[in-house]
Image (tube, helix red, strand yellow):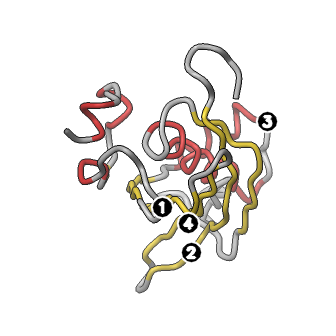
């Protein structure tokens, strides 16, 4: 049985996503890893700017004169999507997170998002990284998170 059979994901969520999750089996264990590939378009950046009110000019193309930088929070949202739907999956809540942005990600780039479980205890620890390929893989976000699994239908940890 694969992950999608255990936790079906709506088809619309998977549009434009490439994933290695079909290789993944429950129960999860340390060093389990999920990778998804997404392209972040200028439309995505513009919609995120409108949603958050962050209209910093670095996120625009300035009439085609510059490359728009993707919001760091948008990249973190891609990581959050993997954590909450794939690994560890539904019911997971982030309680602590550290983010590092060593290089900019530009609108139009294909982003590879990877999440890996480091430890499975009452508090789950994972590390994550996002890369783009510009002649070589370049990290645009990396960090770690501490997670808890919510008790089913209780709203409690």
Sooner in the amino-acid sequence: mark 3 or mark 2: 3
Q: Position of residue 141 (x, y in %)?
A: 63, 66
Sooner in the amino-acid sequence: mark 2 or mark 1: 1
In percent of the image, x 60 and y 35: which residue is there? Answer: 149
The label on residue 86 is none
Q: Nearer the viewer, mark 3 or mark 2?
A: 2
Q: Nearer the viewer, mark 3 or mark 4?
A: 4
Residue carrying label 2: 139
The label on residue 53 is 3
Residue carrying label 4: 129
In percent of the image, x 65 and y 36: which residue is there? Answer: 93
Q: How many numbered marks are there?
A: 4
Q: Is residue 14 left or right of residue 65?
A: left
- Helix, strand or loop at mark 3: loop
Q: Nearer the viewer, mark 4 or mark 1?
A: 1
Q: Is the C-beta separation of discs 2 and 1 under 8 Å?
A: no
Q: Nearer the viewer, mark 1 or mark 3?
A: 1
Q: Is the C-beta separation of discs 3 and 4 under 8 Å?
A: no
Q: Is residue 139 above or below residue 74?
A: below
Sooner in the amino-acid sequence: mark 1 or mark 3: 1
In the image shown, does 147 or 42 lie closer to the viewer? Answer: 147
- Helix, strand or loop at mark 1: loop
Sooner in the amino-acid sequence: mark 3 or mark 4: 3
The label on residue 30 is 1
Q: Nearer the viewer, mark 2 or mark 4?
A: 4
In percent of the image, x 43 and y 42: which residue is there? Answer: 86
Cα distance between the residues tagged 4 and 1: 17 Å
Q: Is the C-beta separation of discs 2 and 4 under 8 Å?
A: yes
């Amino acid at each position: 049985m694969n992950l999608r059979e255990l936790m079906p994901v709506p088809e619309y969520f998977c549009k434009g996503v490439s994933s290695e999750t079909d290789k993944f089996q429950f129960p999860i264990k340390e060093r389990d890893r999920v990778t998804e590939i997404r392209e972040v378009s200028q439309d995505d950046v513009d919609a995120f700017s409108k949603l958050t009110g962050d209209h910093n000019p670095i996120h625009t193309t300035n009439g085609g004169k510059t490359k728009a930088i993707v919001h760091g929070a948008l990249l973190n949202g891609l990581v959050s999507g993997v954590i909450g739907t794939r690994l560890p999956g539904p019911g997971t809540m982030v309680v602590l997170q550290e983010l590092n942005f060593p290089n900019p990600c530009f609108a139009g780039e294909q982003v590879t998002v990877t999440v890996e479980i480091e430890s499975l205890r009452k508090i789950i620890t994972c590390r994550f990284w996002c890369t783009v390929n510009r002649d070589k893989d370049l990290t645009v976000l990396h960090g770690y998170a501490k997670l808890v699994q919510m008790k089913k239908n209780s709203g409690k940890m």
